[in-house]
Image (cartoon, rainbow, N blue to C red):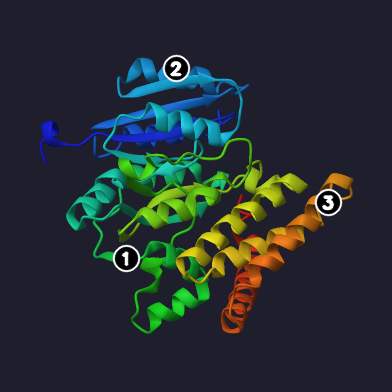
Amino acid sequence: MTQDVQPLVSIIVPVYNAEQYLRYCIDSILGQSYTNLEVILVDDGASDSSPAICDEYAVRDPRVTVIHQENDGIAKAQNTGLDAAHGAYIAFADNDDILDHHNIEYLLHALQSTGADMSKARWRQFGVSQLDDIAAEAAAGASEPSKITVFKDPLRAYQTVFCKSLRMLGDLFGRNTEARYFNEANWCRLYKRELWDGIRFPEGMYAQDVMVAGQLYLRMDKVADINVNLYNWLQSAGSVTHKERSFGFYHDNFEAGATNFQLCLDQHVPPYRSYYTMMGSFVEETSASDSGAASSQQQHDADKAIFQELLSHLSRTDRMRCRVTQKIRLLEKYIYDRKIKNLK
């Protein structure tokens, strides 16, 4: 593919207090084998040297655009990036993660060759002590994928294919189940730009990616999966996912799960994943440090009523399947938390 016919790909990176890891991330993006990139670094009011690092890269590489704004959360930063993007395709990266050298090249090829609306690849977690080794391996680049799997009805796949053990069983029986798995994270995907028309992340809340997941997947006709690892996800004890334990955090996750649950009811899709999200968040609301506040107790009661109302629309069989997959996923989460979230 010659340079003049390569479509522009916009990569959006929200940046906040990531000075220790930011260079690894940006270097992995600018070092992509696919070069026609627009790299949008959105400084969300960082208080460390991250803004200066962003500006440094903008001076060095004309593909880099830096937007500085007051701290207003990752959703606002992502929306700012979407509003500024000019590419025919959109990708996201977290500011402490590392992209494989062939990330965009392979994802774009999979998307264009299959006519899919979104392409995705596999990812892996790593600890801070592995930064240099992972960066070197990512720079060398993964081998070409041996298989591209295309599937339809991604909303159904998102809701029903999420337990790791069941995915392994599916693969064991030749059903290629792992290829149909994806979560609500926006990284390690490549989207057609038009998928984001009229969709923006809800600002001022946690779980902003979960909140828009259902809307995005409902818009898609086909998704293409490639069977190689193209994204390296840093497990940092300082991340919101690892450290946030407020009532608001759990309630926002409950609300996002409830939103997708209702969408599934409207679309006649089994809401197994959203049940897991809602149930887990509802229970964890009571363990939050500020759960004793009167406003928290009132909201918890309101969430209970919402949960019961949504469940009343499920058949007995679907309720049973929701409970079974939830129990399986809880066991997997226990193992995951002990192994992955304690990476050093």
- Mark 2, Cα crowd under 10 Å, few <14 / some 14-19 / many 20+, is some
Q: Position of residue 127 (x, y in %)?
A: 56, 49
How many C-alpha atoms fall within 10 Å of the one at disc 3: few (<14), some, or many (≥20)? few
Q: Which amino acid does the dot numbered 2 rest on?
A: Asp
Distance between the alpha carbons at the discs numbered 1 and 3: 41 Å
Q: Is residue 213 left or right of residue 91?
A: right
Label 2 to label 3: alpha-carbon separation? 46 Å
Which residue is tagged 3?
A: 298
Indicate left or right for 27 with 212 as reference: left
Circle 2 residue: 55
* x 38%, y 22%: residue: 65
Badge 1 marks a residue whose secondary structure is strand
Q: CA distance from mark 1 to mark 2?
A: 41 Å
Give the labeled residue for mark 1: 152
Q: Residue at x 56, y 44 (%)?
A: 208
Quarter that holds the N terminus: top left
